[in-house]
Amino acid sequence: MMQSFKGIPLSSLRQKIIFGYSVIGVLVIGLSLFSFLELRLLERKIAAGERIAEFFDISLEIRRFEKNYFLYRQATDLNENREYVGRASALLREHDPLFEALDEPARIGRLAGDLERYAALMAEYGRGSDNEILASVIRKTGKEIVTVAEAMAKAERRTLQALLDRHRQILIGSVAGVTLLVIVIGQLLSRRVARPLKQMEASMEAVAAGQIAKLEMATEDSEIVSLTQAFNHVIQELELRQGQLVRSEKLAALGTLLSGVAHELNNPLSNIATSCQILVEEVEDTDPIYRQELLGQIDSETWRARQIVRSLLDYARDREFIGESLLVAPLIEEILRLLRGQIPAQMVVSSQVPVDLTILGDKQRLQQAFLNLIRNAIEATADSGNVQITARIISGERGPIPSGWLVFGQCVNQGAMAEIEIRDNGHGIAADILPRIFDPFFTTKEVGRGLGLGLFIVFEIIEEHGGCIAVESHPGKGTAFFVHLPTGDKNV
């Protein structure tokens, strides 16, 4: 089902990214507008604070000139006092709503009356009335004016501080909210983008290691779906090309075998030709027993040639996997017969396989796997040396891996296993190269002498049969391959 957010279809990563950052953009714009309005309000509060501070300063000046007049009786002090009282009254009238917002309107009204009464009292006192009672009333009234002005100044500062605190909290909360939103969007994008890419990276690493598998993505994002389809198309093409390369490798091996097979066929055909020539030239004088012996030789050599051709055809033929019980000894002998023409005269290839040892598998595939291993052993020993082929029964639960072995694959069968060992005393394999010998297209041979698929095909075939393969190699001392294959017997 297509994902949506309040009716908004979000069928692709691009739409989700645009939507997410649009939400962030709207939030940032809203917060910016709110901050602008808050700053405007703060600006007005600061302007109001300036008026309150000015009124408080004027009230202090009124008291200062009042005291000076009481002490020195100078007309200039009285005039200054009268001027500041007028300024205070005018300021109170001009900004009456501002002052009423900071204090009770009735108290502001009394403050205006106190200023008028104070002005009248000072005027009366300035006309020469030297009355201590009047002076006391003037001082009391002036003190009340200063007290109210100071209270309004403090209230304005508290209001301004509260506004600043609220603005700071809103700013911190906004930054935290936007940061959290960005983190959430980042996490969602990480889950939608990074996780599929990580999965695809793991699949690519598996492909590089030779494990070609189709990629399955549980997502409906169109970009990821398209990328998955493209990846699977590449995998499909790789499988196709790999199959073609495997067949090419097989044909290359088949071409190499043909030279040996031609030599092998030449011997029985030569014997058949010789026997036929004797029979033709001496058909009347030939002893019946001798003639029967020649005919038997012709039949035997014909059967021998037919077996060679059949083995070659079995190796070359592509067919579906057919699992059956196979005797290991005849299988190895048949492979050695195909390779006989490639074995140098100075080389010794020996086979010691129990005649009753059987394995479960496809003859044609196992024939190809063992042929590749034996041929590699022959090539590794150059023109002289020894190649030994042995086999034995082992338990599926063998125990710890012997020291020096490097095991490839997992033996899923827990019953009886057949271990076929192919050992040579050739040049061996370097330790840094050994872990990569079963990688596809990896080869140490010269350019043009191999595709690097021989051992890869061996591993694929052994793994297909539920077996595994181990390698032990020491440079300069030789290499041994241990192929473990199920026998089908669970009681060993």
Image (cartoon, rainbow, N blue to C red):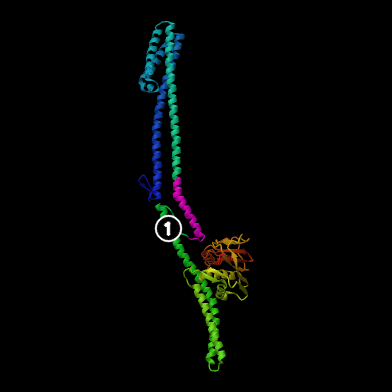
Q: Is residue 240 above or below residue 314?
A: above
Q: Is residue 356 above or below residue 58?
A: below
The amino acid type of the residue labelled 1 equals: Ala
| Mark 1 residue element | helix
Residue drawn at x 50%, y 76% as measured from the top left: 310
**Residue 367 seen in the current view:** no
Question: Which part of the image, by quadrant, shows the C terminus?
Answer: bottom right
Q: Quadrant of residue 433?
A: bottom right
Q: Magenta region: which residues?
A: 186-212
Q: Is residue 60 above or below residue 207?
A: above
Residue drawn at x 44%, y 59% as measured from the top left: 232
Residue 109 screen position, x and y as percent: 37, 17
Q: Is residue 209 magenta?
A: yes
Most common SS among magenta residues: helix
**Residue 313 seen in the current view:** yes
Depth check: give the residue in front, 282 or 425: 282
